[in-house]
């Protein structure tokens, strides 16, 4: 079980490079199943979620090889993976549904289970595919989706990121025109569309709520470097805000981080974009209000890290989580460190200005893990963070090393 020791770490300073976005890389790797030709992806982050996705592609029949940080995938013939355990390890495994269905007319998938932050059903993925002519049969823990697809009109009841990605991938290789209304607008979706366009797909409206895809007969090979990780960059920005740091996040895309930067600036930080990335100076002092929303609203993945920042401002901050039903699990752990937070349903009230004190805390999910590591930086004494689910290694490429490079006292230790 991974464990981290974090000691009080005043004033982070220096520069770190932002890794490539996990949430962009995963759908892009799934999209490699859409062609027989070779796909090469560069700057792939070393994350266990990526390793799982590569294993899933192999289980679908693709040849996968890695050289330094580049991945090559060649999916000459594809089939549904037999290994259900592999699919259940990661929610994003559902992203192979659209590509497999479009490529070979059927996909048999073990239903991804609920997870700690919420139930996370896949009804929107399935309803959208049905609009394109797919038959959906669910039995026990599996779902079988089959049929020869044709273009169609889809309205998403909610702008689900994964459903939008799955439907775009399916439609790219489906005869006719598909229109998706109320599509998700996250930068990772625009990036997926840019990659698919490199493969020969015809897509208009990526990054807006109305996406139109004109299906093509076949897609070809491509070489691509996905976008930087706005959540990793945001998490490091919160670390700077907590410690009155002076930090350069090299390669950060500030245009993807507006909602967070707006909050940090309102709170007293100086956030400046320059040719190398994002520069942050100062300290977040004023309390804030944050309501999680679909992009370009404030991202749910930044709610936990920003909440740690709120614990150190002067006054009462109000957070509202509207995307996932159970995404306040870090609150119990933050309270162990001395934070004063009250949760009422979707609402969290954070009384700032309380000093935190080191304690033993446990990571319950990916973003909670990062938030607790940040909290350890400003807690007096030593904080021990247990991460039984290996969440940090799933989703952040060497977060502890990046914080260390900025002067933080963080280290990974053998678990006791
Ligand atoms: C993606 C991100 C995740 C982020 C989330 C919201 C990846 C790999 N993960 O997850 O980091 O937190 O977007 O920004 O990109 N829902 C349904 N039915 C569905 C699909 C979703 O009810 O068929 C609900 C979910 O339960 C959740 C909400 O919609 O409450 C958002 O989910 P969605 O946008 O699909 O998130 P993911 O794609 O799973």
Image (cartoon, rainbow, N blue to C red):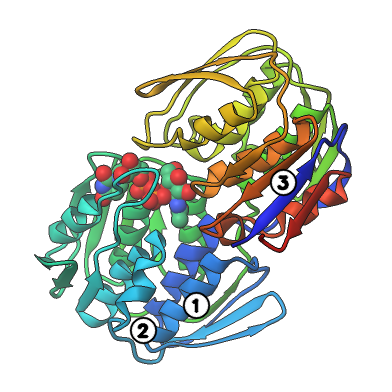
Residue 264 point in image, percent of width and height? 68, 24
Q: Which residue is mark 3?
A: 252
Determine whether label 3 and label 1 are within 8 Å by CB: no
Element under disc 3: loop
Q: Which residue is mark 1?
A: 54
Report if the beta carbon of the residue with label 3 is closer than 8 angstroms to ligand 1.
no
Q: Residue at x 65, y 47 (%)?
A: 385
Residue 379 point in image, percent of width and height? 75, 31
Determine whether label 2 and label 3 are within 8 Å by CB: no
Dividing the image into 4 quarters, which one contains the C terminus? Answer: bottom right
Residue closer to the observer: 401 or 143:
401
Q: Residue at x 33, y 72 (%)?
A: 99
Q: Which residue is mark 2?
A: 60
User: Which of the 4 image quarters holds residue 325?
Assistant: top left
Residue 363 point in image, percent of width and height? 55, 47
Q: Alpha carbon of mark 2 to alpha carbon of mark 3: how far?
A: 34 Å
Residue 197 in sight here: no
Q: Earlier in the sequence, mark 3 or mark 1?
A: 1
Number of marks present in the image shown: 3
Residue closer to the observer: 366 or 261:
366
Q: Earlier in the sequence, mark 1 or mark 2?
A: 1
Give the foreground label among 3 and 1.
1
Element under disc 1: helix
Q: Residue at x 45, y 76 (%)?
A: 32
Q: Is residue 276 above or below residue 87?
A: above
Determine whether label 1 and label 2 are within 8 Å by CB: no
Residue 329 in sight here: yes
Q: Left or right? Give the position of 303 relative to 376.
A: left
**Label 3 crowd (10 A; few <14 / some 14-19 / many >=20):** many
């Amino acid at each position: 079980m991974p464990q981290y020791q974090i000691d009080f770490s005043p004033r982070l300073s220096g520069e770190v490079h932002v890794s490539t976005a996990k949430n962009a890389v995963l759908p892009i790797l799934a999209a490699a199943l859409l062609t027989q030709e070779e796909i090469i992806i560069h700057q792939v982050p070393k994350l266990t979620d990526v390793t799982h996705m590569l294993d899933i592609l192999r289980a679908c029949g693709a040849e996968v090889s890695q050289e330094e940080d580049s991945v090559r995938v060649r999916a000459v013939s594809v089939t549904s993976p037999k290994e259900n355990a592999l699919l259940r390890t990661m929610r994003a495994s559902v992203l192979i549904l659209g590509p497999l269905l479009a490529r070979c007319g059927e996909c048999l998938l073990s239903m991804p289970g609920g997870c700690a932050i919420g139930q996370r059903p896949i009804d929107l993925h399935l309803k959208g595919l049905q609009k394109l002519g797919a038959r959906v049969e669910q039995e026990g823990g599996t779902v079988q989706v089959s049929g020869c697809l044709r273009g169609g009109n889809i309205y998403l009841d909610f702008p689900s990121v994964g459903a939008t990605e799955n439907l775009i991938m399916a439609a790219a290789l489906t005869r006719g025109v598909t229109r998706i209304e109320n599509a998700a607008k996250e930068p990772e979706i625009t990036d997926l569309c840019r990659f698919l366009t490199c493969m020969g797909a015809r897509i208009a409206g990526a990054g807006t709520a109305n996406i139109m895809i004109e299906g093509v007969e076949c897609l070809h090979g491509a070489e691509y470097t996905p976008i930087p990780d706005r959540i990793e960059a945001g998490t490091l920005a919160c670390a700077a805000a907590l410690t009155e740091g002076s930090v350069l996040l090299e390669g950060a895309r500030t245009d993807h981080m507006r909602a967070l930067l707006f909050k940090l600036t309102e709170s007293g930080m100086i956030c400046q974009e320059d040719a190398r990335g994002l520069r942050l100076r100062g300290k977040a002092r004023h309390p804030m209000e944050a309501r999680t929303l679909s992009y370009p609203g404030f991202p749910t993945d930044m709610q936990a890290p920003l909440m740690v920042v709120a614990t150190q401002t002067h006054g009462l901050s109000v957070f509202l989580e509207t995307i996932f039903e159970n995404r306040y699990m870090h609150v119990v752990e933050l309270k162990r460190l001395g934070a004063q937070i009250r949760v009422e349903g979707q609402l969290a009230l954070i009384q700032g200005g309380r000093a935190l004190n080191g304690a033993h805390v446990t990571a319950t999910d990916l973003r909670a893990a990062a938030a607790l590591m940040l909290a350890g930086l400003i807690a007096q004494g030593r904080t021990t963070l247990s991460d039984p689910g290996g969440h940090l290694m799933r989703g952040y490429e060497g977060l502890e090393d990046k914080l260390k490079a900025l002067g933080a006292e963080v280290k990974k230790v053998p678990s006791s």
